[in-house]
Amino acid sequence: MKAKKFDDDFDAGKDVAKRLDLTKARRVKQTPKRVNVDFPIWMIEKLDKEAKRLATVRQSIINIWLAERLDRPSAD
């Protein structure tokens, strides 16, 4: 299939997923890298409380909040 036909089908709302080999798909710049960060106990407690409220885990809260902050336009 030519790219033009694929794009046209996608733009028309047709299901193009069956034409993709998702076994080789990857998210660019989304490979996780482990880092160690030290937080004061009071922050950990508040993070855990918020994670429990949202029915998730601490790491998810930290990831979401950091991503939101880093996506904001800078004031430079």
Image (cartoon, rainbow, N blue to C red):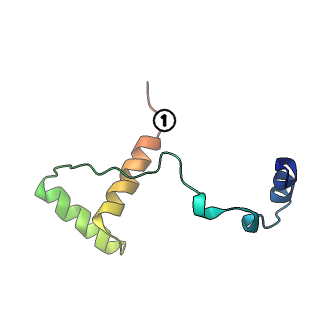
Q: Position of residue 59 (x, y in %)?
A: 31, 61
Q: Position of residue 8 (x, y in %)?
A: 87, 53
- Within the image, what quadrant is residue 57 found in? bottom left
- Within the image, what quadrant is residue 49 found in? bottom left
Instruction: Look at the picture and state if 59 lies above or below 33.
Output: below
Which residue shows up at 25% across the image and 62% down it? Answer: 47
Q: Position of residue 26 (x, y in %)?
A: 55, 54
The residue positioned farthest toward the left in the image shown: 41
Which residue shows up at 36% across the image and 55% down it? Answer: 63
The kind of secondary structure element at disc 1 is loop
Quadrant of the rendering where the N terminus is positioned: bottom right
Q: Which residue is mark 1?
A: 73
Tell whether 19 sits left or right of 67: right
Instruction: Look at the picture and state if 14 lies above or below 33.
Output: below
Quadrant of the rendering where the C terminus is positioned: top left
Q: Amino acid at mark 1?
A: Pro
Q: Position of residue 65 (x, y in %)?
A: 37, 53
Q: Nearer the viewer, residue 3 or 41?
A: 3
